[in-house]
Amino acid sequence: MRKTKICRRISFPKNKVIILVGLLTSHSSRAFRLQTAPSWHDSHIKVFGSKPFHELQDLMEGDANDDDTDPKKSWLRWMSGGKPRDSGDMKLREAEELGGVPRNDRYSSRDWFHNTVSLPNSAILRSIRSPVMFMTSWAAFIALLYEHYQKTNPRIASCFVIPSTPHSLMMSALSLLLVFRTNSAYQRFAEGRKIWESIINSSRDLYRMCILYENEMGKEKRRRIQRLLAAFPYLLRHRIRPNLVMRRLDDEQFKRDPDNTLLLYQDSAAVDNDAEAAAIATQEETTGMSRRKTRPLFWVDKRTLPWRLLPTSALLQCARAQNRPLWVCDRMAKELRTIPDGPYFTARERLSLIGHVEKLSHCIGACERIHQTAVPLNYARHSLRGLTLWLLSLPFALVQPIGLLTGPVLFLVSWLLFGVYEIGYSIEDPFQGTLRLSILCDTVRRDVLADEFARKTAFTLNENFDEEDEEGEGEEENDNSEYMKGRRKGLRLVRTYDP
């Protein structure tokens, strides 16, 4: 009877509870869709135009309300967090072929459910599946033996048990090895991205200077420098990363068109840990004899990037060069050196232009330093050996307290530790797939060539701007304030001193 009274005191009318829950669900669902549904941009990209913000906001809210009543799309929303179930329609940061990632908070804690259920699709897990499965099988085998001998011969079963203190002490040293390796690898990754940021900035600055002094250098020379600048990042990318576009001349699988192909050698930066190259170099230093192997000959299609960007006069010469991005820097410096002096172009402007070319040349050496210098072999092997021995002996410390669960536990532990090691290995050379160099190269080409006509409008001053400003609209025509008078006077001064 007492329980019934308490329930009556705290109970609410059913219809009000239903209305309250419905309002809360609708509001949270609407806020969720407005924040994490980038697919709305794809379906309404044509309606942006010149509509004011409040109309666009109303349109967004209207779309969010369309699917609020669908129970199939909202029953698991509280678990999936920032990941809508219809993820196939989400706009990606990059192309799907490049491993695109949705624009929502893919790495936030509220996306835990999606990241957990997508573990079988993990690229890191595919890379480390061999050692992880071996450690799991080894732990399951030890657990089965222990359970068998514990029933038949407990004395032998006691030999499978060791204290957990040694593993606790070793874990500190092992974690330091893994953390130091991962941190050093991430520093190389961040430095590689900064180098390519410098390439993009220097290319934009050099293009700006060329447009400003186009009258002094001539349109043809400016155009040649512009095309060399657009081809530079592609040639650097081919040097620090094996070029998959090149085909061997003796490869019968691909047919070559002699009229549209170009013969050349592979332009790849040497690696410090190349034993064969080190032996040849040592032999040349000691005996003076050169026994270098004949390099294979490759061919490329001249109609593809970056070869179609190069000027016709520089195409064959650049193809014969050993270091093609450096050759492009040398040619650009020579083009800038031959610009004649004039009233608006002196040695100061020439040195400023060549300074941007020098920055690009420095970026070549910086990329080669990261690509050629690998993590010390002794450090990498010692970390991997220590991790392997620690995991091999871990089942003997876990088999007594957890029994047959040793196998699943070893799967999780080995996946975590081997995954950390694999992450450090994959990002220590960021130019081998971690950084999307193709996107960065296309950024330079688009800013230098593709967006040329639209960008050049910034370098053309409108001579009639003063007259248009005086005509104005509405209130500006009748505004005789000191601010408008000073503004018109300043515009007249700018036009007067415009060279």
Image (cartoon, rainbow, N blue to C red):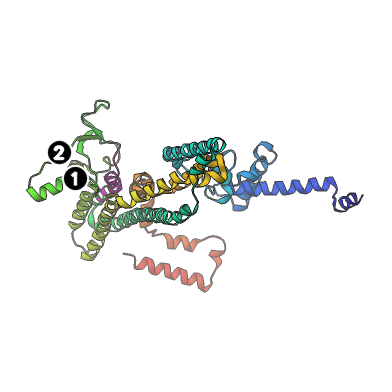
Does residue 298 lie above or below 355 as drawn?
above
Left or right of 219? Residue 180 is right
As drawn, the label of residue 293 is 2
- Badge 1 amino acid: Ala
Query: Which image quarter: residue 362?
Result: bottom left
Looking at the image, tell me whether mark 1 or mark 2 is earlier in sequence order: 1
Q: Main secondary structure of the magenta part?
A: helix
x, y (%) of residue 232?
28, 48
Specify the farthest residue to the bottom: 482
x, y (%) of residue 312?
21, 41
> Is residue 406 something that shows in the picture?
yes
Left or right of 35? Residue 315 is left
- Structural distance between the alpha carbons of marks 1 and 2: 10 Å
Q: Callout 1: 10 Å neighbours few (<14), some, many (20+)?
A: some
Specify the farthest residue to the right: 1
Q: Which residue is mark 1?
A: 277
Pick the residue in front: 372 or 490.
Answer: 372
> Is residue 44 something that shows in the picture?
no
Pick the residue in front: 123 or 301.
Answer: 123
- Badge 2 amino acid: Lys
Q: Is residue 235 magenta?
A: yes
Element marked by disc 1: helix
- State which region is magenta: 225-244
x, y (%) of residue 456?
35, 53
